[in-house]
Image (cartoon, grey):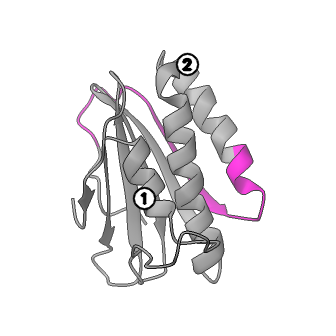
Amino acid sequence: MNHVTPHPPLPIRGMCRLSLTLGEHSARHLRFILRTYLGSWGMEELGDCAELALTELVTNVVRHVPDRRCELLILRRPQGLRVEVGDRCPRLPTGSAAGELAEGGRGLLIVAAVTDRFGFAPLRDGRGKTAWFECDAKGPGPATPTHSD
């Protein structure tokens, strides 16, 4: 399903790819998987920010994708980490104009605040999208949204 990031050139430093149907409590389990990979790669310092960003992307699938199916890619890169969540819902995420007391609508702001880069892109077949973020190994800074990669 992932059509945004080409397969990395060899040698691959580390990768995890999962096809999932998400439930209300899936984010907790996926945070554990992400933290386990980061620990094995010696990138523990990225854990808090990456877990928060992953939680936001997974929550969007649970809330907005009718079948709740997605593909998760966790990719170790020389400069840090890239995480992608692909689904078959063609609607691209948008920021919300909801007031500060609204229950939702701040997920992309959170992802922007805790990652170095993030974005989303429609799949080439027009039947889905991939949302992604990157955290650099030296620590995240403010992110800039990108609509394609």
Q: Which of the image's four quarters has the N terminus?
A: bottom left
Is 137 or 144 nearer to us in this picture? 144
Q: Mark 1 points at which residue?
A: 109
* Residue 10 location (% of width, % of height): 26, 30
* Residue 141 location (% of width, % of height): 31, 36
Which residue ends up furthest to the top in the rendered image? 42
Q: What residue type is labelled 1?
A: Leu
Q: Which of marks 2 and 1 is nearer the N terminus?
A: 2
User: Residues in magenta?
Assistant: 8-29
| 90 relative to 11, above or below | below
Q: In the structure shown, which secondary structural element does the residue marked by tag 2 occupy? A: helix
Q: Which of the image's four quarters has the C terminus?
A: bottom left
* Residue 30 location (% of width, % of height): 65, 46
Q: Can residue 114 be seen in this view?
A: yes
Q: In the structure shown, which secondary structural element does the residue marked by tag 1 occupy? A: helix
Describe residue 67's horizontal placement relative to residue 10 as left or right. Answer: right
Q: Is residue 109 found inside the magenta-colored segment of the image? A: no
Q: Name the residue under label 2.
A: 40
Q: Which amino acid does label 2 sit on?
A: Ser
- Residue in view at x 52 percent, y 71 percent: 105
- Residue in view at x 27 percent, y 40 percent: 8
* Residue 131 location (% of width, % of height): 40, 62
| 60 relative to 34, above or below | below
- Residue 12 image-quadrant placement: top left
Q: What crowding class fits label 2: few (fewer than 14 Cα within 10 Å), some (14-19), or many (20 or more)?
A: few
Describe residue 29's horizontal placement relative to residue 52 as left or right. Answer: right
| 30 relative to 41, above or below | below
What is the CA distance from the residue labelled 2 to the residue labelled 1? 29 Å
Which residue ends up furthest to the front in the rendered image? 100
Q: Which of marks 2 and 1 is in front?
A: 1
